[in-house]
Every structure is written in structure tokens, then in C-alpha cells.
Image: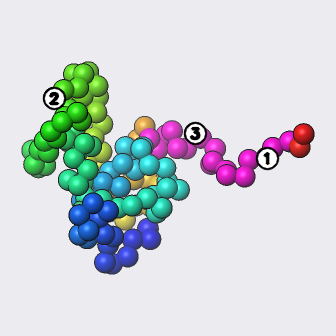
Amino acid sequence: MARCDQGYLCDVCGDEVPEIVDSDLYLSFVIGLVEPRELLARPERHIRCNPVQAQFIVDDRFEPVVVEGVFDKRKMDAESVRTQEELLTRGWRRLQELAGQTLPFIEYPLPEVRERLAERPPASPHRTVSPP
Ligand SMILES: [Zn+2]
């Protein structure tokens, strides 16, 4: 992992994101929203600085995040909220597990995400195109 000792600065509040458990970027990676090759190119953020995503984390150890306005989960379809809560909560718990470990980052994601990544051939930006 290329993360240095000082950590990265949050794109929203400007403070340091000291631990993987605070990282919205790694949370997104764990649940499969961010590709491995995007991980170092994307801006870092605190989990709580991305409330629209953080509101779906439901765990006694996580102080609930409430979003007002159009992205408020209380205004969303119950079924999709349930799906999102399930995913984000599992992802958040996975981050807590990872904190004490030294896994290669490619093994961070949830099992189904790792499976999906393994099945897919690595994306190449230089796909061969037949000449006309
Ligand atoms: Zn922040």
C-alpha cells in the first residue's frame, strides 16, 4: 500500500484521514464501487464527510449519520435502502477487521467483490483495435 505515515488529507474538510477505518475511499473500494487501479488516483475522504454513503452504515459502534434533503434515505424506496444498508454495513465492518491486518490491498474487498475482480480480465486502456 502506498499510503504514507502521514495519511492523506480529506477532500471535503481538509483534515487528515489517519486510519483506514475513517476512509470513505477504502470503504468504497471494499464494497466494489472503486476499482483497484482507481484507488490511488481518487481523492481521500472521511467516511462521515460523505454522509450520503455513510447514512447506510448501521452498527452500534458507528454513530448514525443523518442526511437532510433529496438524498435522505428515509425518503428512498425501502427495499433499496435495505440493500444499501446491508452492503455498507458489511463494508464498514470489513474495514474494522482490516485495520489490524497486513493483507495486500487487493484482498480488502468483500468476498463477492473479490470474486468479481478475479473473474474479470484486467482492464486494458490499450485495447487492440483492428485497422480499418
Ligand atoms: Zn473530512
Tell me the residue that label 3 is attached to: 119
Tell me the residue that label 1 is attached to: 128
Screen quadrant of the N terminus: bottom left
Q: Is the magenta stretch mostly helix, strand or loop?
A: loop
Residue closer to the observer: 111 or 9: 9
Say which amino acid is labelled 2: Arg
Q: Which residue is drawn at 39% across and 61% down?
A: 43
Say which amino acid is labelled 1: Thr
Q: Is residue 12 left or right of residue 116?
A: left
Tell me the residue that label 2 is attached to: 74
Alpha carbons under labels 1 and 2: distance apart = 47 Å
Alpha carbons under labels 3 and 1: distance apart = 21 Å
The segment highlighted magenta reads 113-130
Q: Is residue 21 something one can see in this rendering? A: no
Q: Is residue 111 left or right of residue 80?
A: right
Precedes in sequence: disc 3 or disc 1: 3
Residue closer to the observer: 105 or 43: 43
Picture coordinates of residue 71 (x, y %)? 24, 35
Q: Which residue is drawn at 14% across and 45% down?
A: 65
